[in-house]
Image: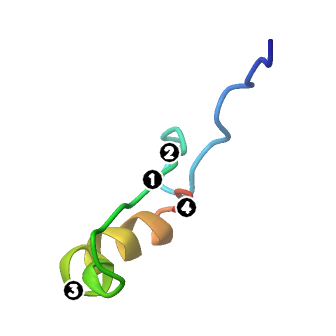
Amino acid sequence: MQRYSPAPPCKNGGVTQATLVVFHAHPDDEALLSSGTIASATAAGHRV
């Protein structure tokens, strides 16, 4: 059984780092529908 360590601190003031996985039906949908969310999460230090 693999054990996971706590998530590392994030750049935004010690909030826990998250990992975002984004699925879209078409190749350009992430650029059209959620690029702002992806950019914000990346800028805050989350893994995308």
Q: Position of residue 11 (x, y in %)?
A: 56, 57
Alpha carbon of mark 1 to alpha carbon of mark 2: how far? 6 Å
- Callout 2 secondary element: loop
The type of residue carrying mark 3 is Leu
The type of residue carrying mark 4 is Gly
Front residue (pair 32, 16): 32
Disc 1 marks which residue? 20
Alpha carbon of mark 3 to alpha carbon of mark 1: how far? 17 Å
Q: Which badge, 4 or 2, comes first in the chain's sequence? A: 2
User: Nearer the observer, disc 4 or disc 3?
Assistant: 3
Quarter of image, res 29:
bottom left
Disc 4 marks which residue? 45
The type of residue carrying mark 2 is Ala
Q: Is residue 9 left or right of residue 13?
A: right
Q: Residue at x 31, y 87 (%)?
A: 28
Q: Residue at x 45, y 53 (%)?
A: 20
Q: Which badge, 4 or 1, comes first in the chain's sequence? A: 1
